[in-house]
Image: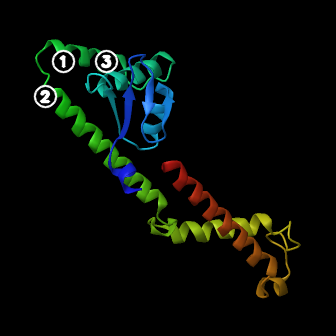
Amino acid sequence: MAKAENSPLLIKRYASRRLYNTETSDYVTLDDISGFIKEGRDVQIVDLKSGDDLTRQYLLQIIADNESRGESVLPINVLTDLVRSYTAGAGTMVPDFLSASFEMLREGQSKMVEQMSKPMSGVPGFDQIKAQQEAFMKTMMGGWTGGKMPGADDDADAESPKPESSDELDAIKKQLAEMQAALAKMGK
């Protein structure tokens, strides 16, 4: 299915203004097209009769619909500057600038997701933080697992490891791994 991933999804607009997905052979809405784009697909919308590329017009309509529903991404000053760019003759510079800016944003997001998905052990000072957490959890959990509370005068317990503390540490490690996996999913 490499074709679907590399080439844009072709949407044909009929004279009735209905939009037809050529891959699934069914009609779609602007919300469907927005969903395809959010999933990472590129789309191309073409008028069936004239062959004109209508992609830009429909993408602008999707943006306008999102903005009117309160899903504001573009601040007023950016919208104002965009309108000005149409009248100021800066039409050639603005698209290049916007394209480069969004490319930098995508790269930054990719790097952030990559960093978040790396194991926490790569964070400087992680070993010290881990040791502090273990000591804190051992202190706090000592009374709940049948162990002695801090300051108790039983030297025998201090020298013999408790099987519960190992189980607790494994549970904490499991929870940490689950949190890391959830963070990685949120970044995608």
Task: Kindly report the distance in space between the C-alpha atoms of the residues bearing marks 1 and 2.
Answer: 9 Å
Q: Secondary structure at mark 1?
A: helix
Query: Of label 1 and label 3, which has the lower sequence position?
Result: 3
Mark 3 residue type: Leu
Query: Of label 1 and label 2, which has the lower sequence position?
Result: 1
Residue 69 percent across, percent down from the top left: 51, 18
* Colour setup of the view: rainbow
Question: Callout 2: few (<14), some (14-19), or many (20+) C-alpha neighbours within 10 Å?
Answer: few
Q: Nearer the viewer, residue 11 or 185?
A: 11
* Left or right: 143 in relation to 182: right
Residue 150 percent across, percent down from the top left: 79, 69
Is 183 drawn above or below residue 66 in the view shown? Answer: below
Residue 74 percent across, percent down from the top left: 37, 23
Q: Which quadrant holds the N terminus?
A: bottom left
Residue located farthest toward the right when viewing the structure as drawn: 146
In the rendered image, which residue does mark 2 sit on? 93
Q: Secondary structure at mark 2?
A: helix
In the rendered image, which residue does mark 3 sit on? 79
Residue in view at x 42 percent, y 24 percent: 62
Query: Of label 3 and label 2, which has the lower sequence position?
Result: 3
In the rendered image, which residue does mark 1 sit on? 85
Locate residue 20: give its quadrant.
top left
Q: Nearer the viewer, residue 135 or 43?
A: 43
Residue in view at x 85 percent, y 78 percent: 153
Mark 2 residue type: Met
Mark 1 in CB contact with mark 2 (< 8 angstroms): yes
Task: Kindly report the distance in space between the C-alpha atoms of the residues bearing marks 3 and 2.
Answer: 16 Å
